[in-house]
Image: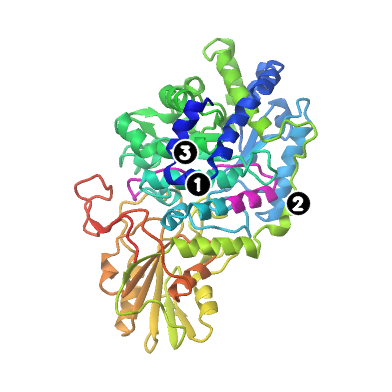
Amino acid sequence: MDTSRRQFLLSSLGAAAALSVARAADDQRRFTQFDPHARHRVSEMSVDEKIGQMTQPDQMSLASLDDIDKYHLGSLLSGGDSDPKSGNDLLSWTDLYDHYQSRALATKQRIPLLYGIDALHGHNNVIGAVIFPHNIGLGCSRNAALVEQAARITAIEVRATGINWAFAPCVTVPQDIRWGRTYEGFSESPDLVKVLGAAATRGLQGKALDDPLSVLACAKHYVGDGGTSFGTGLPRGGKQRFGLDQGDTRMDEATLRKIHLPGYITAIAMGVGTIMPSYNSWNGVKCSASSRLLTGLLKQELGFEGFLISDYNALDELPGTRKQQIAQSINAGMDMVMITDRYREYYNTLKELVQEGTVPMSRIDDAAVRILRVKFSMGLMNPEGKFLADRSLHKSFGSPEHRQVARQCVRESLVLLKNEKQAFPVKKTGRIHVAGKCADDIGNQCGGWTITWQGQSGEPTKGTTILAGIRAAARGAQVSFSRDGSSAEGASIGIAVIGEKPYAEMQGDRTDLHLDAEDVAVVNRMKSAGVPVIAVIVSGRPMLIDSILEKADVIVAAWLPGSEGDGVADVLFGDYKPTGKLSFTWPRGDSTSLERSDPGYKTLFPFGHGL
């Protein structure tokens, strides 16, 4: 990357300039540094071997272990719910990684695998990992140094299982909170996203990509995934649905650049090694097939020197035959394809496209060079390198020290929306009655992408529930509990922990964001008991809370705090002052639209609000 372009990128960082930008820029230069080595290696490779580097199956769809050798695979992934057959524990994941990497190291080429996984808020697929608040909560902290620290711990816990590539950070800028991926975004504001996305990139990749405690980061989903128009998407199978995940982002280029591009500019400046194009379209053209976006804007104008990895089976969403889909995406600039179970077909079809000249050999060489350039920068091409898991890292996995940082993230992410009648902070005396479906439920407070893709209520992993945190913090008080809010009579105060159950993309798209009737009933019962009521809202987005607005004396937005519920208790009892500021505007219940740019949108609490 030349000096003028690097200065252009770094000038976009603004407040993030304090994040060691000089060292981060060195990471991008490392790609160029290894360019001659990558080109020499590629010149010695067959077409089959180059295409193999461009192929990424899901491990659970791998037909045979020997296919790693037969198809010269450059990468594997574990997508959502693609777990070791022996279980989701630390040892099983480590054994899984070593199993596949050992096979790659036994091939003639001996090029190690890049193994990818979604580590969105900690190493969230593995039982016992520290689960951090989802990005929407971290956005409310406004604390770039803390976000970097959380990402650094995530990298260490990922590397404890051997895995070397995290599909994070998500630098989306959601504009419509009905979208089921809203919580993956730090903010509706690109100014905040570009700062925190840069911090997360730095935390994952560390001081250098060849650091054994670093993982390769992946900024996603490029570009405009947070700006899709409601009702414009068609899922796999063709049935109409809400379409906020795979829909169309309809705006001119100036608006796209202003709102949705800044997070990628700063991630590139911080040395991000991979970027994942999105499912969505921009003005009718799928991002995964847009030469203008992938090659013209990203690689040529912004000077991105890493490689592009497609989203999960994203080729299925492109128009035309299978052959046409592959040709469109590769010719547009896609370097590696996440093809899951159809990898053999993809491999053979791409080879056929090259032989007939539809995909030029120069495009294959460019993709292979980009992939190997990143592998060289990670130290994976070092003949003396150690590529299996470092099991000594197991001792720090899920450690108290890591959990303490997550607890701090929870404290700083909470937003005090309303505070009346001096009910806050809570006194640690008398009887405190706790209620609600999210009070004693690790699954609810962690949300989606926790052990399973969509997440689940109950106890999917280890941690401290909000109720347990309250009991530990208020040992001098009597703490009672009822899920439905009953039996609050005579209590000093009631704490209703209510909100959403877990979800991820597609299943999380909702037209109605009013609180469930069950949640409203909990607040009503506690209010009828004549006690002051604190409502703690656990959710992946702002909810429509007008039904409890007058009945709750205190309202706290806790977002999806993750595994450390005692961080919520720290704020409720005043051991830590509330400092969180809304990273999203909070709408009123009588809004006729939940997209901020629409005339029917009405604001209850403005962006930046926090008492």
Viewer-nearest residue: 595 or 211: 211
Residue where numbered disc 1 is placed: 18
> Tell me, what colour scheme is on the image?
rainbow
The three-letter amino acid code for the residue at tag 2 is: Arg
Quarter of the figure with the N terminus = top right
In percent of the image, x 47 and y 36: which residue is there? 10
Residue where numbered disc 3 is placed: 266
Name which of mark 3 and mark 1 comes first in the sequence.
1
User: Measured along the vertical axis of the image, is residue 602 above or below residue 204?
Assistant: below
Name which of mark 2 and mark 1 comes first in the sequence.
1
The three-letter amino acid code for the residue at tag 1 is: Ala
In percent of the image, x 36 and y 33: which residue is there? 257
Q: Which mark is residue 391?
A: 2
Q: Which residues are magenta?
A: 152-178
Position of residue 195 in the picture relative to residue 475 (left or right):
left
Is residue 344 visible to us here? no
Label 1: state its secondary structure.
Answer: helix
User: Measured along the vertical axis of the image, is residue 589 above or below residue 284?
Assistant: below
The percent position of residue 265, horizontal first and vertical second, equals 45, 35
Q: Residues within 10 Å of mark 1 (few under 14, many from 20)?
A: few
